[in-house]
Amino acid sequence: MTSTPAIHKPKLGVSACLMGVEVRFNGGHKESHLCTRSLTEYFDFVPACPEVAIGMGIPREAIRLIGDPANPQAVGSVHSELNVTQALADYGTHMATEMDDICGYIFMQKSPSCGLERVKVYQDNGVPATDGGRGIYAQAFCARHPNLPVEEDGRLNDPVLRENFITRVFAYADWQALLRNGLTRRGLTEFHSRYKYQLMANHPAQYRVLGKMLGSMAKSDPNEVGPRYFSELMSALKKCATRGTHTNVLQHLNGYFKKTMSAGDSQEMQRLIAQYRRGVVPLVVPLTLLKHHLRQNPDPYVAQQIYLQPHPENLSLRNAI
């Protein structure tokens, strides 16, 4: 009897408090059920709490950001002489090296160490700056991994942002697998071919730009073109697809089956695509019928498209968009 091979799960960095670990300044946690229940079957989480890691106790004095929102200082909320800015930044740089095999990171929102955006940065008059800033640890970490998919836990409550983030995580993991096998011109071209319709959904213009980039690399070193391509890819995928762009992709994919569909099947497909466009049904409905026709009439080019299944089906991420 042969054993079932282990499924490789991408690693995700995560703020430890989101995993239910009691590391917050007040001795509590901020458990995210999305992380601890929904995603644990599909990802290996690597938790970190920078404030505890740099030697601050549990419980501890809360810290806050002050000064220039673009370059704030992290100081004690009671004792302003407590300044942990450099320690948090150094730990961020250190963990960016340690976590060199993660494919994404979920940060604690509004945290002066881990928040990604709109973190309160207090001014001399005691009032927060209008735009806010970024947590010290998160800033240092993300500076070392500019292409890494990152998101705050609160924003992941939005089904569109959640699906977008998970799509990017698996694209990042896919690219890492390509790198492990060694970059070749053929490998790059095939990778881009698989992401054609996913890119068309997220950023149609950038799909054409990236296609031209690879089309002109006949004599270029793929190890030079590859990093530029990947950076542009991750930037493009960060743009959320809309009902309009999804509809465009569905129509393109449907075109592959026009000759094999009956008139009734074609009408049904068009009806469901139109219903999706109007918000009557979620994306999974026309996609499911499209996959049915693909099984009935296999097409190797369509079958390889990441768009059809950019993340595990059981996550049901497209049931809510």
Image (cartoon, helix red, strand yellow):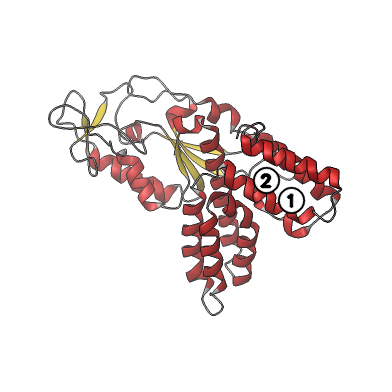
Q: Quadrant of the C terminus?
A: top right
What is the number of callouts on the image? 2
Residue at 57 percent across and 67 percent down: it is: 183
- The residue type indicated by label 2 comes to Gln
Measured as percent of width and height from the top left, residue 162 is found at 53, 36
Q: Mark 1 or 2 closer to N-term?
A: 1
Q: Residues within 10 Å of mark 2 (few under 14, many from 20)?
A: some
Q: Residues within 10 Å of mark 1 (few under 14, many from 20)?
A: many
Q: Quadrant of residue 134?
A: top left
Measured as percent of width and height from the top left, residue 152 is found at 43, 35
Residue 311 can be seen, yes or no: yes
Task: Give the alpha-carbon distance from disc 1 to disc 2, as whole Å.
Answer: 16 Å
Q: Nearer the viewer, mark 1 or mark 2?
A: 1
Q: Quadrant of residue 181?
A: bottom right
Residue 23 versus residue 107: which sits nearer the camera?
107
Measured as percent of width and height from the top left, residue 265 is found at 83, 44
Measured as percent of width and height from the top left, residue 253 is found at 71, 52
Q: Which residue is mark 1?
A: 254
Q: Quadrant of the N terminus?
A: top right
**Mark 2: secondary structure:** loop
**Mark 1: secondary structure:** helix
In this image, 276 relative to 99: left or right? Answer: right
Residue at 63 percent across and 70 percent down: it is: 186
Residue 156 versus residue 270: which sits nearer the camera?
270
The reply to whether callout 1 and callout 2 are in contact (CB within 8 Å) is no
Residue 4 can be seen, yes or no: no
Residue 78 versus residue 59: which sits nearer the camera?
78
Mark drawn on residue 309: 2
- The residue type indicated by label 1 comes to Asn
Q: Is residue 6 above or below residue 319?
A: below
Q: Is residue 122 above or below residue 71?
A: above
Residue at 80 percent across and 54 percent down: it is: 258
